[in-house]
Amino acid sequence: MNAAPPALNRSLKPLPKPPVRIVHLGLGAFHRSHQAWYTQHAPDAAEWGIAAFTGRRPDAAAALSRQDCLYTLVERSAGGDSFEVIGSIVEAVDGANIARLCELVAAKETAIVTLTITEAAYGLAADGTFDAGAPGAADDLRALSAAASGGTESGVAGMPGTPLGRLVLALARRRDSGSGPIAVVSCDNLSANGEVARRAVLGLASGWGSGLAGWIEANVSFVSTSVDRITPRTTEADIAEVEEQCGYSDNSPVVAEPFRNWVLSGDFPAGRPRWEEAGAVVVGDIEPYENRKLWLLNGSHSILAYAGQLRGHATVADALADPLCRKAVEDFWDEAARHLQAEGLDIPTYRQALLERFGNARIAHRLTQIAADATTKLRMRAVPVMTAERADGRSGAGSALMLAAWIDYVTAGNDFQDPLAAEIEAAVSLDGTERVQGLLRLVSAALADDPDVVALVARLCGSFATTPAATPART
Ligand code: CS2
């Protein structure tokens, strides 16, 4: 029997460890294939190390720490794989280690906090405002108020549990340490994600009192970004492939498509890596780029996630190869494209590139992964397009089909993860039109209050039925 190969950190020449100047919340595969890649490829990479904190569980930090935070990025194209060791993350920390988070955010050298905490973690109400009554937020407001009146971050009990609650505590420490302005950079798929992050952080900071919100307004720059790189969850087969091809063992490789894109808009008062020299784009007005990506890429992903699974498919590539799903995607794109008119967006080329990216069958992008957190995602992906279509006097049938596919998906009893899971279950137990309206309300009150929209979505339910018993679509 062959001996197991050495771990990658033991088999490679040590990489230089840049000092921590970026703190990241949400150590997952996407951060490692995207922001960590851009940071490694910036010409001033030697000055910018990342300390990355996990979200709910410590596992990813523990695994990465065992190999000096190094990991392999597998770039998977239709033609084959290439491998690169990424070393820009220099510290991987359990998200519950709030003391370390406070220490790093309060440090003068730290210039940036990046976030990949998922869309749902911003605690937005359906109208886009910060929801102080949401379970995580309400607990954190209490915890922050207790901490402000004498708690310490080392006594974990009563400490904030959400990433943004923890960030607020850490920003309070930065204010107290006099380390000055800092940038918070959201890298989650939300429109105006910088502004959303600002609202959520300020909302939570009100729990702290003593002028913290005012300090944040004056000293924290909330940068908006549009991020893009398809990064499926790593599988055991990926781990085995890295071992075979690279000759070392890596417990945390990450697989991504060759394509990557990062558009940023906002100020970095304490500096930043020269990411633009690694291909990032810095713009004044991010909205058109953000909408192009959120609607065309993420919107069609959501269609494929629900319609595809209803039709028995497991991956994006399989679903796209199904003519019914493909038509739903193209119809939605036609609709969305009418509201993507800014100069330079080149929608035909973007669409063509998406077809190629989604069709890359070597990237097994699971539809179950995309299906999660629908209520938050559909607010960004279906609602704006449908609202714009209706304002222009059209039906919005392409977006309505995305909503109908989701409604059918949850109604059919498929497993799902969603911050509003209990509300979804309650709505699913209603009958017919009431069920459609109840589910729509979780995504947009305005759409649920429009009888024409409810009727249209109800009519489209059943469009992806694969069993003869289900109602066929009547469009
Ligand atoms: C996907 C995204 O899971 C999802 O909701 O639509 O993660 C998508 O793969 C990325 O935004 C691609 O950049």
Image (tube, rainbow, N blue to C red):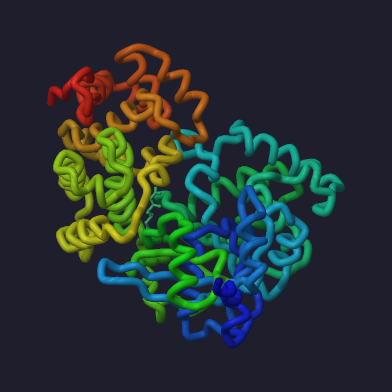
| Residue found at the very far right of the displayed protein | 150
* Residue 219 visible: no
Q: Nearer the viewer, residue 137 or 375?
A: 375
- Of 381 and 253, nearer the camera is 253
> From the viewer's perspective, is residue 462 above or below residue 169?
above
Position in image of residue 403 (x %, y %): 30, 32
Quarter of the figure with the C terminus:
top left
Q: Residue at x 75, y 62 (%)?
A: 100
The residue shown at (38%, 28%) is 410
142 vs 78: above or below: above
109 sits to left or right of 464: right
Mark count? 0
Is 156 drawn above or below residue 111 in the view shown?
A: above
Q: Position of residue 212 (x, y in %)?
A: 70, 52
Position of residue 399 measured from the top left corner of the image (x, y, whole percent)? 24, 37
Query: In the visual, does 434 lie left or right of 51?
Result: left
Q: Quadrant of residue 443?
A: top left
Instruction: Name the quarter where the N terminus is drawn.
Output: bottom right
Residue at position x 41%, y 19% from top? 428
Asked if one can make out residue 213 in the rendered structure from this viewpoint, the answer is yes
Q: In the rendered view, does 287 fall on the left or right side of 425?
A: left
User: Which residue ends up furthest to the bottom in the rendered image?
Assistant: 13
Classify 19 as above or below 343: below
The answer to which image quadrant residue 251 occupies is bottom right
| Residue occupying image coordinates x 72% and y 50% | 211
Q: Whole-percent x and y of residue 351?
A: 19, 57
